[in-house]
Image (tube, rainbow, N blue to C red):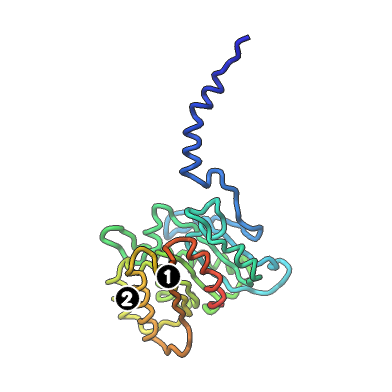
Amino acid sequence: MKKNLKPTIDFLRILPVFLLILFLNPTFAQESTASQNISFFTLESPQLKINKKIWIYLPANYNNTSKRYPVIYMPDGQNLFDAKTSYAGEWNIDETLDSIKAQVIVIGIEHGGEKRIDELTPFKHEKYGGGKADDYLDFIVNNLKPKIDATFRTKTNANNTAIIGSSLGGLLSFYAAVKYPEVFGKIGCFSPSFWFGRKEMNELLSKTENFTAKIYFLCGDNEGDADVITDMERIEHWVNTKRCECKKLNKKVIVKGGQHNEKLWRESFKKAYLWLF
């Protein structure tokens, strides 16, 4: 009896396409690497007119105590905890904090994909657009943070509320400390994109009298743009003009060979967290 070979032939025809999809989209087959401490929910952002996925990291002993915890808010939530959702490798936030038994809650906020530049930048750029960071921060301060504080046992004051981000997220984190000093008292400013709106940022800072946040500046010396270090040191100098360096409220780290990628930020997160907290 002649066998029907059509299913086999059809499979062989689509196999190269399947393999191409697999290659171009690693998350297609990637298993989740998020720890059991990770959960998530969706929250509407009326400011951004979108529903945001929110990741929550809780300390391993959270359910066995009645204590309250400081909170870190972090943009680019897809890249923080899970290789399955990350764009170019995760930060391993959950594994890192678990390894040192850190007593902190981390909130990861989903970035807006093609609207990421809009969300994370305070000023409009002639070439790249953007400029909706005020709406993004309004969502965090007036929608997300109240929900987190009402749902979890948090320490709500500025000294126990941090925001940490990289690249445009680093720019956003610094801007958050300028705009909401009463909310964000600790800042992680990784490879900050201060090139985005230099003029506007300078104008803003010229009108800003105080800077109260504790801030950790970080970048590599091989990020592909020499201005990253120059811009970061310019902002650091401005911070130092607003308070005595003797207070030791800011730290600058330039990693030899460090590039503008998740590897640098992943390997630097632990030191930044320990210094900030």
Residue 219 is tagged as 1
Q: Along the horizontal axis of the image, is 248 left or right of 229?
A: right
User: Residue 50 is drawn in which quadrant?
Assistant: bottom left
Residue 62 is tagged as none
Q: Position of residue 34 (x, y in %)?
A: 61, 56
User: Residue 226 is drawn in which quadrant?
Assistant: bottom left
Residue at 47 percent of width and 74 percent of height: 187
Tag 2's secondary structure? helix
Q: Which one is in front, 2 or 136?
A: 2
Residue farthest along the top direction in this orientation: 1
- Amino acid type at circle 1 is Cys
Q: Position of residue 27 (x, y in %)?
A: 53, 47
Can residue 68 be seen here? The reply is yes
Can residue 51 be seen here? The reply is no
* Local crowd size for mark 1, using a 10 Å CA cut-off: few (<14), some (14–19), many (≥20): many
Tag 1's secondary structure? strand
Residue at 54 percent of width and 55 percent of height: 42
Q: Along the horizontal axis of the image, is 191 left or right of 144?
A: left
Q: Position of residue 130 (x, y in %)?
A: 34, 60
Q: Which one is in front, 192 or 141?
A: 192
